[in-house]
Image (spheres, rainbow, N blue to C red):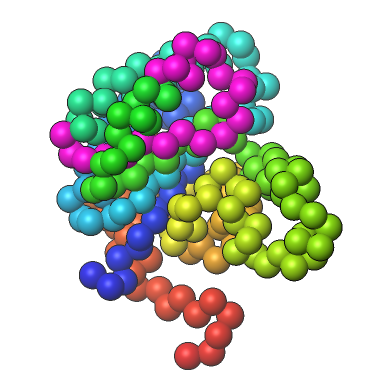
């Protein structure tokens, strides 16, 4: 159990290709992907993983067709609302991180209500990255740092001091980052926080990624030797 990752993060990829392979519209893949989110969340609660983060919508995703973006936002809002009672029952805390100013005000209000209501839950913290990019995160952190610190304080700042300006302040860096669908890139995700994360790439499309696939990734992680630049 001491080798179990504390924080697992997932780049959920392949919904559109999964749907296309079945002769369906992309939204069909997104809807089935919600079932994978539920399965992975349950696995984390069952196995004792404390943090689960999901890359749901990037800043770059705003460039997709407007109709798809609107459908995605509606789907995510409904999916999170539908899971609200389950979060309360299983002591799951929800956090939504990213450039929230770009989200629909009604969606923001819904998310804020669920975040506030689940804030004291302590079994699992689920972090959903919406309208997020790693470069944006570092840039907004630098701006906050410059606005709040003097030149002398900035000069003395260390890495842990800079961490508190990121949107993930107070959240441990991911031990393991999983990407589904066979792509092997980070796609502008957690560029600072993932500096020492282990990566696991799988050809399984996100809608097919359920508890067995998740636990296979955890097993692969636990068999690795993490050295953080040191010699063992």
| Direction from residue 184 to residue 177 in the image, left or right | left
**Residue at horizontal 78%, vertical 48%?**
146
Which one is nearer the viewer's eye here, 138 or 165? Answer: 165
Q: Quadrant of the N terminus?
A: bottom left
Magenta range: 89-110
Q: Which residue ends up furthest to the top in the rendered image?
A: 67
**Residue at horizontal 28%, vertical 55%?**
49
Q: Is residue 232 visible?
A: yes
Question: Does 184 appear above or below 198?
Answer: above
| Direction from residue 152 to residue 121 in the image, left or right | left
> How many numbered markers are drawn?
0
Q: Which residue ends up furthest to the bottom in the rendered image?
A: 232
**Residue at horizontal 71%, vertical 43%?**
144
Q: Is residue 21 visible?
A: no
Question: Does 78 appear above or below 219?
Answer: above
Residue 199, x across and y down, in percent: 49, 59
**Residue at horizontal 58%, vertical 53%?**
164
| Direction from residue 154 to residue 160 in the image, left or right | left
Residue 156, x across and y down, in percent: 75, 68
Which one is nearer the viewer's eye here, 77 or 29? Answer: 77
Question: Does 107 appear above or below 119?
Answer: above
Q: Is residue 82 magenta?
A: no
Which one is nearer the viewer's eye here, 12 or 3? Answer: 3
Q: Is residue 101 magenta?
A: yes
Residue 198, x across and y down, in percent: 48, 63
Which one is nearer the viewer's eye here, 192 or 226? Answer: 192
Residue 188, x across and y down, in percent: 64, 44
């Amino acid at each position: 159990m001491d080798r179990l990752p504390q924080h697992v993060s997932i780049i959920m990829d392949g919904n559109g290709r999964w749907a296309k392979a079945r002769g369906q519209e992309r939204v069909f893949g997104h809807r089935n992907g919600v079932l994978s989110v539920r399965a992975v969340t349950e696995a984390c609660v069952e196995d004792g993983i404390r943090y689960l983060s999901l890359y749901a919508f990037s800043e770059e995703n705003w460039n997709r067709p407007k109709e798809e973006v609107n459908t995605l936002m509606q789907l995510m809002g409904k999916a999170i609302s539908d899971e609200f009672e389950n979060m309360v029952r299983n002591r799951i805390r929800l956090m939504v991180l990213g450039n929230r100013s770009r989200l629909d005000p009604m969606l923001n209000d819904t998310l804020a209500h669920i975040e506030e209501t689940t804030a004291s839950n302590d079994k699992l913290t689920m972090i959903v990255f919406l309208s997020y990019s790693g470069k944006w995160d570092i840039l907004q952190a630098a701006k906050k740092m410059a606005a709040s610190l003097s030149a002398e304080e900035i000069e003395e700042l260390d890495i842990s001091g800079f961490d508190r300006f990121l949107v993930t302040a107070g959240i441990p860096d991911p031990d393991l980052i999983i990407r589904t669908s066979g792509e092997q890139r980070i796609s502008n995700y957690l560029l600072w926080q993932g500096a020492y994360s282990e990566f696991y790439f799988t050809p399984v499309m996100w809608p097919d990624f359920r508890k067995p696939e998740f636990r296979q990734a955890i097993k692969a992680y636990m068999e690795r030797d993490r050295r953080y630049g040191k010699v063992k």
